[in-house]
Image (cartoon, grey):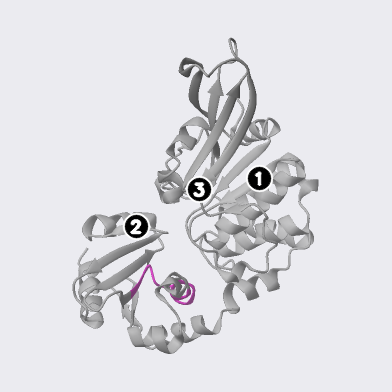
Amino acid sequence: MSLEPQGQFKKFLEKSKDVLILISEGPSSDAVGSAWSLYYFLEKLNITPTIAFSNNLSPKFDFLTKPSRLLKELSGARDFVLSFDTTRNKIIKLRQEEKENRFNIFVTPEKGSVDPRDFSFILAKFKYDLVVVIGIPDLEKLGNLYLKNTDLFFEVPIVNIDHQSNNDNFGQINLVDVTSSSSSEILANFFENFNKNLIDENIATCLLTGLIGGTESFQKKNTTPKALALAASLMDKGANQQEIIRWLYKTQPLHILKLWGRAMAKINWEENSQLIWSTISVEDFVQSRSSQEDLPLIIEKLQENYSEGKIFIVVYNDTPETTVILIKTTSPKMMEKLYSHLDGEIKKELLKIRLKNNNLLEVGKSIAQKINSL
């Protein structure tokens, strides 16, 4: 009889020494809470975990204990082996030299010279026994981590953990539960079944961070009695709910608050499409001492503060001649619809559109009109 996904995951972990945990670019609170909690849980199992994701980590997560093995790219995930057949001639000495952008390896054989037929190049196995992908509906959403390391996903078993309904079930093991509020809730359930005594204050704090982020502090419709009961259990283990909320929702750098204030002063509401949009000028960036990299957080704050909204847009100039529209939605199906009708690319859960028109208000009204007509 085959094991259910949790049992399969446990079996894989029992045979693993090195586990790679992957989350999305510019990860959400749920992704960070999930990945961090799994990292510390695996360490208690004497497994070496590594977390990788593209882009930067928001300072709002600084209150969490930061994992020591945190990567932005997967360099060194696989060795390149120079192999010698020593049946007829043994190798007695090796030395290396780096000179003028060349890395040279000198090989000294026991007899005469090395026969080229005894020499070959081999790609070694990846250092990871298991890859755990958290909160990603399909592998392409991993960005460069996937595009630059496609062999990894064919050669190493994948555990796919997610609560989104559009998940492709791309893993050999799929812990996908659309009735859960978050990936953190799925992992908390797994930890409880595996060994609940391993959930300490640190792991509980990480899980509660993900749970609070995934439910928007228990205000979203996905907040179930099960999620509330889990939150209470995690607080019993030492997780501080008020501190988590303070960091996630109230503690922001001054430049973010200034930029947020300028965005709020130019808010527009489209009732038909439940669209919230705002423009941010070059002067707004200069006066607030902020940059384009801060805009995903501004869109997050729009979503947090306008629960009636379903589509959230920021419009800004990236050059003197062009304007960029960043779009975020509360529904994956809506995002797919917008992507199919508007030219652009999806990155870090945002639809990005670039137009050759530097008039922010004109572009904003035009994109709002298009969305209203869908």
- Image marks 3 and 2: residues in contact by CB distance under 8 Å: no
- Whether residue 128 appears in this view of the structure is no
**In the figure, 173 relative to 301: above or below?**
above
The part of the chain drawn in magenta is 301-314
SS state under label 1? strand
Q: Three-letter amino acid code at disc 1?
A: Pro
- Residue 63 in view of the camera: yes
| Image quarter in which the N terminus is found | top right
Of mark 1 and mark 3, the one earlier in the sequence is 1
Q: Residue furthest right?
A: 197
- Report the quarter where the C terminus lies: bottom left
Mark nearest the camera among 3 and 2 is 2
| Left or right: residue 13 compared with residue 112 | right
Q: Residue extending furthest top?
A: 88
Q: Nearer the viewer, residue 182 or 223?
A: 182
Q: Which residue is mark 2?
A: 346
Label at residue 49: 1
Q: CA distance from mark 3 to mark 2?
A: 22 Å
Which quadrant holds residue 290? bottom left
Asked which secondary structure carries label 2, the reply is: strand
Q: Is residue 171 above or below residue 290?
A: above
State the CA–CA distance, disc 1 to disc 2: 29 Å
Which residue type carries mark 2? Answer: Ile
Q: Residue 178: which numbered mark, if any? A: 3
Q: Residues within 10 Å of mark 2 (few under 14, many from 20)?
A: some
